[in-house]
Amino acid sequence: MTREPRAVDELNIVLDPSGPLSLQHQLRYWIVHAIHSGVLRPGRRLPSSRALSTRIGVSRNTVGLAYDALIAEGLLVSRPRSGIFVASDTPVGRVAAGQATTGRESVLAGRLTAPSDDGGFRCPNNWHLYPFPFLDGRIDPELLPVVEWREAMRLASTRHEALEWNRGSGDGDDPMLLEELRSKVLPGRGIDAGLDHLLVTLSARHALQLVGDLLVRRGVPVVLEAPVDATFERRMRERGADVSSLDPELARPLPQGAVVVTSARRAFEAGSTRPQRLLEAVSAADGVLVEHTPASATSDGDRLAPALRALDVEGRVIHVSSLVRAVSCGEPPGVVATVPAVIERLRQQRRSQGAVLPPVLQRAWAHFIGLGHYSAALARTARILRRRRTALRDALNHHLHERASIRILPGGSAYWLRLADNVDLRELARQAAAVGVLVEPVRLNDGHDALCMGITSLSEACIRDGVRTLSRLLRDDLSPAPHRLDRDPVAPLRGRALRRAMSGVRLLYNTVYGEPCTLELRADGSMAGVAGAGGEDCDQGRWWIEGDLWCRQWQQWAYGEAAAFSIVIDSDQLRWYSETGMLVDTAVIIRRSRRDVDSVRR
């Protein structure tokens, strides 16, 4: 009998049946990783499909399909009556090198300027795992037209389309996308533009940056309308611009030659005289106007005035907008509409940056708009967001009527919540995150602090419970966890109930240095942790039960030392107590219903 190679054990393959990829694709990932990491070297024989399927607990057909796909790619070869081997010409060689410096004290790190920190809100990378993420601009899956996007991407990826990807159109954008923007998107704001009047950028912020870099030099007066894009304002100050704020009443004359930038959150109602007055003020100062208006997914049923670009008869307005984020897979493209001479210069700048939206994405957007998916998705999303906004308004009125006032801008997808009491909103946001509620503290243009509570990131069914939790926190009904186990009103879990409660649970908590962290305790006793706003700090470990204590040991975190805790689960909160009975930390349980916790206790 031929003995199977030991690669079965060396691969250490673990597949997740509940993962987003099929078992076949997961297996291919594992094998390719093993080849590139040197575990499977060129010429190495792989185990038979029967042996590998038995070892990792999948069907033989799954292994066979994975092998066939990698053979077709040329990474594996099949030799008759011998088996399957790693191809000898697989380009996975590694060049030996010295130990790379990764510490903060490197020469490169020493040359960095101090990071800019405006004290603003940093959205955690795992925001979608929180029970109540009231974050404006973060999109939950209910809003995304996934089926429609799959069709658009499939059409943009046909063989015929792929042949055109690298042929391109010079520095220009996809003519099909420009035509769809010109004929179906921009007319909604009254803009009539030719193909040579349009430029596509990576995002609205990228478009605004390009325009600012083109128009602004040292000493140029830049007048910003509140609320201001903090990143853009900082960039203009770094370029030496003379930055000031726009008078809301337009009572003061503008500086000569000023670059006026309108707010991304400002809209003009039909019949208002302010747009014309603003254009006249810019003309009197011989200035230019940058109209920064990323598209909104909501509509209040009011007819908005035409865009300022649509009213421009002197060629002074640059319209900067974007497609709607709520129906986009990721950051939506930005759009610039202005005179051809400016578009040509912006196109040159974009080329010098190497920052062009890839052709396949431009063509996918063209299909998405042209097939009617964009307008249909906007209508559907607007209906959903109007219901959510009503639910948030009613919940705030019911639970925080006496302590707060709310404000919303036309077409907005968030409420700005101002509290009557002298509350530290940044501290409140930190405490709210500890009980599963994410809110963003902001500074309004009138100088007051508020909480921005968005509706694009959570379902209508979650809104009232989230507001109720926030109101309980404000009323001190959610008191801090007891510092001692013997003072906790909830009894700690024991024995089998403890094991059932911790097996497969996922937890959210903040590290001692304030960064979000996600913990996953797997049923097989392994555990994984991801910390940091960008998920950059990761570790693996193991957990087990000893008597009535839950024990854990990380590979790197907590010095890799084993520790034991008593566990208390109170509603959606989990509390760790040390062996001496002192509170160690708290966490929020995610994706687990209250009914499940009650069944564990029973």
Image: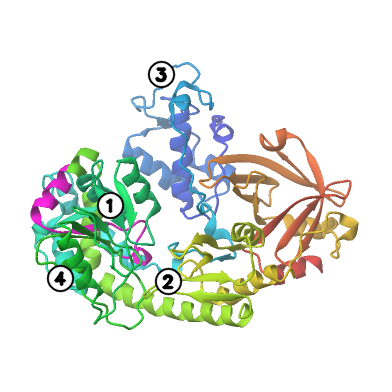
Task: Return the x and y of residue 361 as percentages of the image width and height.
Answer: 26, 54
The label shown at residue 222 is 1
Colour setting: rainbow
Q: Is residue 570 above or below residue 379?
A: above
Residue type indicated by callout 3: Val
Q: Nearer the viewer, mark 2 or mark 4?
A: 4
Mark pair 1, 3: CA separation: 52 Å
Amino acid carrying label 4: it is: Leu
* Residue annotated with mark 4: 311
Which of the numbered marks, if any, corresponds to residue 95?
3
Give me the residue at 37% from left, 62% from top: 226
Q: Tell me the CA gap for discs 1 and 4.
A: 22 Å
Q: CA distance from mark 3 to mark 2?
A: 52 Å
Q: Amino acid at mark 1?
A: Val
Q: Nearer the viewer, mark 4 or mark 3?
A: 4
Determine whether label 3 and label 2 are within 8 Å by CB.
Answer: no
Please identify, in this view, whether the residue under mark 1 or under mark 3 is nearer the observer.
1
Q: Earlier in the sequence, mark 1 or mark 3?
A: 3
Q: Secondary structure at mark 4?
A: helix
Question: On the rendered structure, is 532 left or right of 240?
Answer: right
SS at mark 2? loop
